[in-house]
Image (spheres, coloured by chain):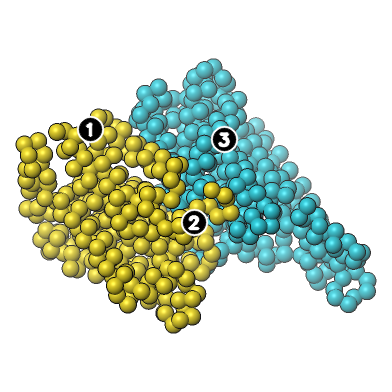
Chain colours: A cyan, B yellow
Amino acid sequence: MRRPAVFRAAEPLATVAVSRWSRTASAFTAVCVVVVAALAVVPYVIGGPAEQPLITLFTFIAMASLWNLLAGFSGLTSFGQNAFIGIGAYALYVVALHGVNPFAGIILAAIAAAVVSLPVSALVLRLSGGYFAVATLVVAAVFQIIATLSPSVGGTTGVSVPGLAGYADVLREALTYWATLAVAVASVAGVYLLVRRTFGLDARAVGSDPVAAASSGVRVGRIRLLAYVAAAGGTGAVGALIALQTLYVEPTSVFSIQYSVYMLFMVLVGGMATIEGPVVGALVLFLLQETLSAYGAWYLVIVGGLAVAATLVASRGIWGFVGERLGWSLLPVGYRVRGPAPGAPDPPATSRADPNKS
Amino acid sequence: MNWVNAVIQGMLLGGQYALIACGLSLAFGVMRIVNLAHGDLAVCGAYLGLVLSSVLGVPVWVTLPLLLPAAFVAGAALQVLLFGRALRHGVLAPVLVTFGLSVMIENLLQVAATSDPRGLNGGALTLASFHITAGITVSWLFLTAFLTACAVLSCLQVLLSRTSWGRKVRATADDLDTARLVGIRVRPVFATVAGIAVATAALAGVFIGTIGTFDPQAGTNTLIFAFEAVVIGGIGSLWGTLVGGVALGVTQVVVGEVNQAYAVLAVHLLFLAVLTIRPGGLFTSHQAAAEVRARGVPG
């Protein structure tokens, strides 16, 4: 009702065309398909040595895209998403213990995390801003303590992931690789398809001004709930993948706040509320980790410092800056009006993206 | 008698939580900023106390005349350089900036001081205690922490309600734009408020470090406890913060009496229960509660 009205109003000006998709976007989508296909055959072509770093990268991409759905699009800056990493990891352990194939268990872990997030959301979504942020920290702390106090999941010492004894190491690593690739692609594509719907416009309205959004008819509570539950489910799948990579689930590591720090860094540095930004941020974090992780704590000092700098100096992140300069919108989520310059009788087929080309 | 003792010890412990929390509450009340690095700044205060007291070779209390002004200046500088800028970038930026700052502080402390737990030299006060009855022993240190919290809260209350500075602070907190219109210079007000918030955090850090131990990662838990005290007590109510801190402390010690493993969990659950039943906290103004609630969501 809201959005179509705007565009119908534009229709009488027959020379104005409103579009979202562009040739750049088509070309980039084709490139994406090729890249994903190439990545999918890596286990056959290169094998083990390339798999481990790429698994880390895919994990980062999935975490960043999902946090972007929360914080970037919907304005919910949760620093307790590590709760769902942990819940996903423990859920994988539990379903694998009951005989479910661990790789199929990833989906069940995602569902478990989403289900747990429902009652949690009823509590934390009552708050906003910084209060919401700290409440999510409390929730993560609660789940970590509960895991520590539960002897059935190993208490403080943790548990090994069962059900993987039947797989040869090469096969197990390749399957983990494919599963991580699939979750990363599903996260990016899922968030993209979700924000292209009316939900995306509503979520950005809620994120920038909830009162204004509510007064123009957006169901603020529902939008927040959907974003929170979707992000929790996806993050649960990531947690299950982390358990599959490490083969061991231990409360202090799977509930580590470091995951939330990474999510914040990738989204801020890459560019909030764009689809491309978190992927760029994930690449940056991956490169930083490859080069700086030997420096231990300094690495995290730099990560925190860059996140602060990105917020204050370049609030649109790397992608916001580069995309603007190049006039690219590779995975567009907004609309563009193409039409004549004021007064020009004949519309040349130009887009706002490249105004000099006619 | 055991239970009476647990409640008394819990109340005294709650004083410490209130001492950390009052700076958080003040900064939120005036600048609308939830400083996620507040706990880490308290831990920084403890480390500064450690350095000063070992360099000078005196109990940490003697270093307070140096430490508190240093913390005040640090807080004011953070406000001017970081938080003030973040506030101009919209509502999310302060959350992101203070969280990034928290990550930086924790890891810088890790680099500078390793992750070994440390304690502060509290002098003769550390082990001194007195008996109320046969079963109840009160540590002078805990009592000092509690009374300090009460004193700090009283001072803040008097400053805010009786002085011209306090009037400016309250005007700014009520309506920033109108305060500017009537000629209040907002930046110095914000800087002094942030300075006081960080100085109280550092003072709380000194008590934490003297009573127990601290390490570079202690800030996040400190923040969580402080935050819980603020929310349970009610946003924007200084004495509510004391009640919130006492509620946390009593819960922690009484549950710990039954089973130590569940003490912290019980505190978090108390917080979540208050959030469910009375989201505004126990003592709260309507306006402050509305600020905290998710806007646009009924109820």
Q: Is residue B155 above or below residue B120?
A: below
- Please give the label number shown on residue A177: none
Q: Which residue is mark 1?
A: B257
Q: Which is closer to the viewer, label 1 or label 3?
A: 1
Q: Quadrant of the C terminus of chain A?
A: bottom right
Q: Amino acid at mark 3?
A: Ala
Residue plotted at (40% across, 22% down): A152
Q: Is residue B19 above or below residue A155?
A: below
Chain identity of mark 1: B
Q: Amino acid at mark 2?
A: Ala
Marks 2/1 same chain: yes
Q: Is residue A228 left or right of residue B8?
A: right
Q: Is residue B102 above or below residue B158?
A: above
Local crowd size for mark 3, using a 10 Å CA cut-off: few (<14), some (14–19), many (≥20): many
Q: CA distance from mark 1 to mark 3?
A: 36 Å
Q: Is residue B70 left or right of residue A203?
A: left
Q: Is residue A31 above or below residue B57?
A: above
Which numbered disc, 2 or 1, marks the residue that appears first in the sequence? 1
Q: Is residue A283 visible?
A: no
Q: Which residue is mark 2?
A: B290
Chain identity of mark 3: A
Local crowd size for mark 2, using a 10 Å CA cut-off: few (<14), some (14–19), many (≥20): some
Measured as percent of width and height from the top left, residue B30 is found at 40, 66
Measured as percent of width and height from the top left, residue B41 is found at 32, 58
Q: Which residue is mark 3?
A: A114
